[in-house]
Image (cartoon, rainbow, N blue to C red):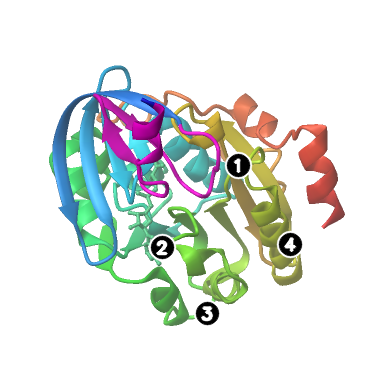
């Protein structure tokens, strides 16, 4: 048995006796596993391996290059937080850009904001969009909003071409910095983001786990403090199927009208649109709480 284990590939996840194990150099020495009922889709796009399986306890699961992107059961915790942390922190957001987020979940959440007039999304991989529409209709429902325009392409190139000061908010719903999302964690990208935002505009980017990736977070915070002259804050939430069970967000605003991320001023009127399902995770209390950091993380982040 031990010999068999040793022959397993080290850097790729594999479906072994009925279980999916998430093995990656980004979290060495640990691998969260889910019991597989059925593999529903396996494909290879120009950018990554794409897989969908039915799990025993978390519903359908979307996997890119061996890494879980979302499950039907806990996607609300991620999509609602990455969207409403920025959008509930500014008055009347009108123009919103999503980078990545091909599954459509962030679009679904942005669409709850009635002030929003334009929602652009730039996702690099059309296969993620198509697979999400086919297997995750409750997530991809975000594409049905008439305010949404999909651009298939690299978010880095897209942002470079954006007219200065266009967006009220930019949400970077990226995968991990190994693979096509690498540049979305680098300084030039944050520069383009800050240029594309209006004065006092906000950005929220996926910013990894305080348990696993403090070194990545430190770099992101240091870069953001140099580039964004308004507020720079780190927040986090729980997502049981992400490595270490938590994920963080970097929230920044550009110079201009000040933004106090910790005290949301633009609550969502959950009853306004009866066609939408109610929020499952986000509320104003959890919004403020998301900025309270454990001492070990606070120390590092405050020192940057
Ligand atoms: N919304 C998800 C959730 O619930 O956790 C997670 C992540 S989403 C699927 C990440 C997306 O970022 C992927 O679809 C990936 O193709 C996309 N992506 C990666 N690099 C990109 C780039 N350079 N430009 C645009 N999109 C990119």
Residue drawn at x 65%, y 37% is: 211
Residue 219 within the segment the image draws in magenta: no
Query: Residue 209 bears which disc, if any?
Result: 1
Residue 171 can be seen, yes or no: yes
- Figure quadrant of residue 137: top left
The spot of residue 244 in percent (x, y) is 56, 32
- Which residue in the protein does label 3 denote? 164
Label 1, label 4: how far apart the Cα atoms are: 24 Å
7 with respect to 252 (left or right)? left
Q: Earlier in the sequence, mark 1 or mark 4?
A: 1
Residue 259 can be seen, yes or no: no
246 with respect to 125 (left or right)? right
Instruction: Tell me which segment is drawn in magenta.
Output: 2-31
Say few, some or many: other residues with alpha carbon within 10 Å of mark 4 (under 14 / 14 to 19 / 20 or more). Answer: some
Say few, some or many: other residues with alpha carbon within 10 Å of mark 3 (under 14 / 14 to 19 / 20 or more). Answer: some
Q: Is residue 51 above or below residue 37?
A: below
| Callout 1 touching callout 2 (CB < 8 Å) | no
The spot of residue 170 in percent (x, y) is 49, 59
């Amino acid at each position: 048995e031990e010999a068999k284990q040793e022959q397993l590939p080290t850097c790729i996840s594999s479906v072994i006796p009925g279980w999916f194990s998430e093995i990656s150099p980004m979290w060495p020495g640990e691998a969260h596993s889910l019991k597989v009922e059925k593999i529903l889709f396996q494909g290879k796009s120009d950018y990554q391996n794409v897989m969908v399986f039915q799990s025993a306890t978390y519903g359908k699961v979307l996997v890119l290059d061996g890494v879980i992107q979302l499950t039907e059961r806990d996607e609300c915790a991620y999509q609602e937080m990455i969207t409403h942390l920025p959008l509930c922190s500014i008055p009347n957001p009108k123009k919103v850009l999503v980078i990545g987020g091909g599954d459509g979940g962030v679009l679904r959440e942005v669409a709850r904001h009635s002030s929003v007039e334009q929602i652009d999304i730039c996702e690099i991989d059309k296969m993620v969009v198509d697979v999400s529409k086919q297997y995750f209709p409750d997530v991809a429902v975000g594409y049905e909003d008439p305010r949404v325009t999909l651009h298939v392409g690299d978010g880095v190139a897209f942002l470079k071409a954006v007219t200065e000061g266009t967006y009220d908010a930019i949400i970077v719903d990226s995968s991990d910095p190994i693979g096509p999302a690498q540049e979305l964690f680098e300084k030039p990208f944050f520069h383009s983001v800050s240029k594309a935002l209006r004065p006092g505009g906000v950005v929220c980017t996926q910013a990894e786990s305080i348990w696993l990736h403090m070194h990545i977070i430190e770099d992101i915070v240091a870069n953001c403090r140099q580039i964004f002259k308004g507020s720079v804050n780190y927040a986090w939430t729980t997502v049981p199927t992400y490595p270490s069970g938590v994920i963080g967000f970097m929230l920044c605003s550009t110079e201009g009208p000040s933004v106090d991320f910790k005290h949301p001023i633009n609550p969502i009127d959950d009853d306004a649109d009866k066609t939408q399902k109610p929020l499952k995770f986000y509320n104003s209390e959890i919004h403020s709480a998301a900025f309270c950091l454990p001492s070990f993380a606070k120390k590092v982040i405050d020192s940057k």
